Amino acid sequence: MRKVVATMFGIMLALSAFRPIFAQSVTSVTAQETVVDQFVAALSNPLLISILLVLGVLALLAEMSAPGGFVAGLVGVIMIGMALFGLSQISANWLGLGLIVLAFILFVLELKTPTLGAAGFIGAIILFAGLLILFNTGTGEYIAQLSLIGAALIAVPALIFVLFIARLAAKERRRKPITGQEQLIGKTAKARKDFAPRDGAFVGQASALGEIWKARSAEPVRNGDILLVTALDGLTLEVTPVDEVTKKTIKETNGAQPVA
């Protein structure tokens, strides 16, 4: 997560270095008397506002895709707050802001549902349009208007980032559960005593994961036999005895170890 935040700051600094490419009709800002005035003047720059707004929401999307931390989410909230403060200092087209919000809603949809990139691409197009008109109020009172190249160089990386974390989120959803009782399936257990015949099967106890379980087998089981867990029926293990060759194969393929 720290790498994601560091990458976002790096992108912001790199984009700021290419300010003439991103913005057109930029007017000069005279030196202010106080540090606070200089800070407010810097936040009134449309290019910086756009970058802060986009990176802030991307940080929140990163937090949503990998919950548990707080760094990316906190940075995202701070960036969005600074962007909104900058917007309050200048004239802005609220339709453009609405389009940007809609774009990020589509980005969230891309993360949460398997749209195969469709929602992400549409969101990037809407984000591009929103950035173009965000500072164009039609009155000529805006400080600067993002150029086509500037809007594209913000929207395209945003799309790439969203598709990247959406792919990671999809892999996480498809990952087989490895916690809880389901991790017993495919592992080995050890019979604690001879299994007794009952209802056409053999029933007894087996130890697995340091616990004693009820176990049922279709074949006879002797005390100390190594058993392969094939299924879980409530709190009863469905097991089958394994020979030495099978035990070696299990160890080599999934690392299962007999549990005493």
Image: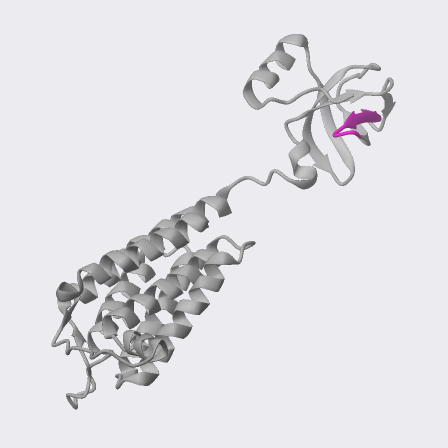
Position in image of residue 226 (x %, y %): 74, 17
Q: Is residue 116 visible?
A: no
- What range is drawn magenta here? 202-210
Q: Residue at x 48, y 62 (%)?
A: 73
Q: Look at the picture and state if 130 lies above or below 62.
A: below
Can you say which quadrant of the picture contains the C terminus?
top right
Q: Is residue 152 left or right of residue 80?
A: left
Position in image of residue 141 (x %, y %): 18, 88
Asked whether residue 203 is drawn in magenta, I would say yes
Q: Is residue 198 left or right of residue 32?
A: right
Q: Residue at x 13, y 64 (%)?
A: 21
- Give the overall secondary structure of the magenta segment: strand
Q: Look at the picture and state if 130 lies above or below 150.
A: below
Q: Residue furthest front?
A: 33
Q: Residue at x 64, y 40 (%)?
A: 179
Q: Is residue 211 left or right of residue 141?
A: right
Q: Nearer the viewer, residue 4 or 226?
A: 4
Q: Quadrant of residue 98?
A: bottom left
Q: Nearer the viewer, residue 107 or 220?
A: 107
Q: Is residue 13 visible?
A: yes
Q: Look at the picture and state if 206 lies above or below 147.
A: above
Q: Residue furthest top?
A: 244
Q: Quadrant of residue 250?
A: top right
Position in image of residue 48 (x %, y %): 27, 69
Q: Residue at x 41, y 63 (%)?
A: 108
Q: Is residue 66 left or right of residue 50?
A: right
